[in-house]
Image (spheres, grey):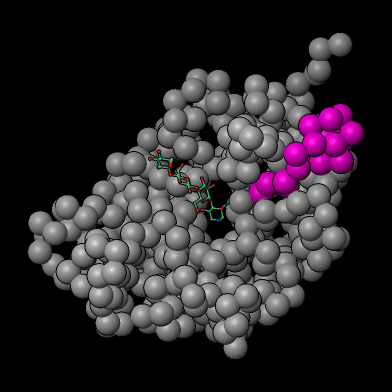
Amino acid sequence: MMKQSPAISLWEAYAFPVGAAVGVRQLSDPAIAALCVREFSALVAENAMKPMYILDRQATLLGGSNTRAAITLEAGSPIADFAAAHGMTLRFHVLVWHQQTPRWFFTQGWDDTPEAPLVEADVLAERMANYITDVMQAVNRRWPGLVSAWDVVNEAVEPEHGHPQLLRTRNSLYYQIMGEGYIRHAFQTARRNAAPGQALCYNDFNSFQPDKQQAILRFAKPLAAEGLLTGIGMQTHLTMDFPASMSEYEQALRRYADLGVEVQATEIDIRTHDNTPTGQQALADRYGALFAVFRRAVRDGIPMGHVMLWGVRDCDSWLCRPERPAYPLLFDHTGARKPAYDAALQEEKQA
Ligand code: G3I
């Protein structure tokens, strides 16, 4: 029997924007583009708006400044153009992140040789502020009203690094050069450049784990009280048994909301390599439980921001490898809705 198409789509089912991470290549596929327009009201660039794709070293060297890197928005512009053309909003991922930011951004003379000496804290502070300022102003000028949320700082907490406040140290040149102050500096700069209504988010994975939650709350609380941070992004990369209970995730979401900020589920996928009907029904049950958390939050007046899948089709997922396929999302490799889709949508119909 042909499966009935649901009467409504994901974005129509919820009061908050629902979307997915995409790459430029995916949007050039008419079938995926049509699926995104039908199902989503928001997009986020999976990679194309990360510093490594925006920073232009040749133009930086030609510019001759020691504190202002040259930027280009071309890599991600097709995604922004698509979202704007279809009345969607865009989450901007990501301004300050220890990954996918070239090392030359942190070196004397923008030197890209492997062991080039690093700059001092005051120089990096200016470089960071100029980068955030130039990107936010260029994006808001080119796509006015499009960006609804900025991932200002991503993944600054890493309990395994042994910092007294569990901050990421070992692989963060921002931390190593500027210390913890880079977090506040990033949010202060973003605050000065945000357009009205744009959320300024701290984004991290496993943010429901008690130790990470405490570490995030410690620096986010004062930033939120000063209006510098207005959103917490819970990345939501889950597995079938982590967290053991969805109530752990729900309690964390509500603790973040208690800061008086919006909470966003920014990078949802639920890792499974089991594509059997039983395995996919178990995945559906887990998605149903997750979207029930979002629905209860809205019911209880918690400001739920974006709810974003980290990919469109299973085969698009960063978790899916040729040698080990994964099935973590709501649409299968053909773009067909999976039981997990029905579960996410079904929760709303039962509301
Ligand atoms: O662009 C190059 C391409 O030129 C080259 O041919 C190809 C093969 O080496 O690599 C391409 O770069 C890859 C990039 O994705 C774009 O596809 C990188 O190798 C690969 O490491 C990178 O992976 C991304 C990863 O972030 C990087 O850390 C994933 O797609 C992306 O899903 C993942 O997303 C992160 C979020 O940004 C932050 N939260 C965690 C999440 C999952 O790690």
Q: Position of residue 169 (x, y in %)?
A: 49, 77
Q: Quadrant of residue 185?
A: bottom left
Specify whether 251 is left or right of 139. Answer: right
* Region of the chain picked out in magenta, as a range: 268-284
Q: Can residue 139 be seen in this view?
A: no
Q: Where is residue 295 in the image (x, y as percent from the top left)?
A: 78, 52
Task: Depth check: give the residue in front, 117 or 8.
Answer: 117
Residue at the image position 49 percent from the left and 23 percent from the top:
29
Quadrant where the N terminus is found in the figure: top right
Specify whether 307 is left or right of 42. Answer: right
Q: Quadrant of residue 18?
A: top right
Compared with residue 265, is residue 201 higher up or lower down, i.e. above or below?
Answer: below
Q: Does the magenta stretch include residue 242?
A: no
Q: Where is residue 332 in the image (x, y as percent from the top left)?
A: 69, 28
Residue at the image position 17 percent from the left and 58 percent from the top:
60
Q: Does the magenta stretch include residue 281?
A: yes
Residue furthest bottom in the image? 164
Specify whether 115 is left or right of 154. Answer: left
Residue furthest top in the image? 1
Quadrant where the C terminus is found in the figure: top right
Q: In which quarter of the image is residue 196?
A: bottom left
Q: Position of residue 176 (x, y in %)?
A: 41, 80
Residue at the image position 76 percent from the left and 30 percent from the top:
338
Compared with residue 204, is residue 83 higher up or lower down, i.e. above or below?
Answer: above
Q: Is residue 85 visible?
A: yes
Compared with residue 286, is residue 83 higher up or lower down, i.e. above or below?
Answer: above
Task: Depth check: give the residue in front, 154 or 174.
Answer: 174
